[in-house]
Amino acid sequence: MRQRILALGAAAALGASLLLGGCSLFGGAESGSTATAETAAPTPEPTPAGEPVPNPLTGLADADYTNRRPVAVTLRTLEGAAPHWGLSAADVVVEGVSEGTTAGMMALYATPDVISKVGPVGPGRDLMLQLALPLNAVPVHIDKNIYAKNLLNTLAYQDLDGYHIGKAAFAFDQDRQNAGYREENCWYTTGEMIVNGLSNYGVTLEGENAPLFLFGERPAVEESARNGTTLTIAFSPDDSEQLVYAADTGLYAKTNADGSPTIDADNGQQIAFTNVFVLYASSGIKDDGYTRQYDMTGGTGLYLTGGAWEPIHWTKEDATGPLQLTDAAGEPLVVNPGKSFIAIWGGYYGQGLTLTGADGAEQTLPEKPALLESGISDEAAAAAQAEFDAQQRIVDAQEAYTDAMAQLPDAETALTDAQTALDADSENADLIAARDAAQAKVDELNQIIADSTAILAEAGIDPAATPVPEGDAAAAESTAE
């Protein structure tokens, strides 16, 4: 396994903390916008008293949601977690980096009735709670970080945590583990298990709900006005995702960082959304040195629907305050009924945002949010990253040199044996192929030794000397989500 550098000097430490990423209990970045709105905003009609309540997360009148609380399931997203179960049934999917370089994910459901299976379930994060709590949603997760724990305890807010409730509300998919998945990526829950788990606390899903957005039918977007059809969100250099508009469905289909479709493992469907939001939020680092902090009191952002986009502004009073959106004119933003994707985006070093229209023209987006006081400037981050990469190159070269030197004697012996066999039967095609393969292996190892020696010599290191101490090459990877 490749060794990773934890920190070599102050700049390298800065680079490591830069790439690690969370959120504050309260929190809003304000920045100007140069784009203009493309669609008019009609006035939505309120639900008459006594009428069935539409879905508070989608605005669709597909059932009566009176006195029904949503649920908010945190999902694991690190390597080996995908594909997820239950994404296509979610009314809203939220993503944002809390720790590390991979965005965490939360799936919101207006009712657990639609959850046949959802997972793998991950640990709770206070960034996600910022959007779940104002909806009176029940947070569902397995374990949680200290910031999420403190927030829920302060509010005396009951969650459903597999760390405490165990198999009363969560189950293990043995088939997935047998297929090679790690244990932590095999835990899931269902709508029925969520209800049963809450009953252990004497809690039900009866209660008030609140609409996530101001829903209302918007004018159709003309084909010539589709200026927002492909959105690329870089949460980090290792996690860049796309949402691509399909005119035939009117939905934005989501892809993974590797370009593959984001598929629901429960039914094989690619997940897609009527609405896509990017909420700009100023960010920094919390007091633990690696959890990302966000100012969640407000900021600018983007709203995409129907293939078009417009700049928006958002506000939240505190962790339990509802999300409020306004358009470029300062009027309440009317949102098309349907499922939504919400990205919380800090715009810090390593993050990027690109939006193109149907004609391929790249759009001019609002300025990225300013850093919080605990944030790291792009210049300092770039310098730290460069030093980090340079030191890692040395570590890799030393490892490669050592490994190649260890393999070379056996490779040379194999070449000698292959040549001896060929000398005895020079026309044998199999022996010729074996000799050529053995020669290629020796040549490959010698090339690795030469390349590694050059890298180490440039750094003033004798490759035959004592290897780099393991203490200076400790892992700098975050294992939290």
Image (spheres, rainbow, N blue to C red):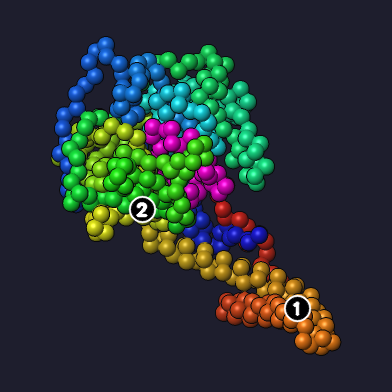
Q: 353 or 185, which is in the foreground?
A: 185
Query: Above or below — where is 263 with respect to 138?
Result: below
Q: Earlier in the sequence, mark 1 or mark 2?
A: 2
Q: Marks 1/2: CA distance?
A: 51 Å
Q: 270 or 313, which is in the foreground?
A: 270
Is 280 left, or right, of 226 in this rendering?
A: right
User: Which disc is residue 232 wearing?
Assistant: 2
**Residue at the farthest top position:** 50
Q: For the magenta stretch, what is the residue range?
A: 76-102
Query: At 79% across and 78% down in the image, what residue appears?
Result: 414
- Helix, strand or loop at mark 1: helix
- Residue 451 at x, y percent in the picture: 60, 79
- Residue 99 in the magenta stretch? The answer is yes
Q: Main secondary structure of the magenta part?
A: loop
Q: Which residue is mark 1?
A: 430
- Residue 134 at x, y percent in the picture: 36, 27
- Residue 278 at x, y percent in the picture: 32, 44
Query: Callout 2: few (<14), some (14-19), or many (20+) C-alpha neighbours within 10 Å?
Result: some
Query: At 57% across and 66% down in the image, what residue appears?
Result: 392
Q: 382 or 158, which is in the foreground?
A: 158
Residue 316 visible here: no
- Residue 413 in the magenta stretch? The answer is no
Q: Amino acid at mark 1?
A: Asp
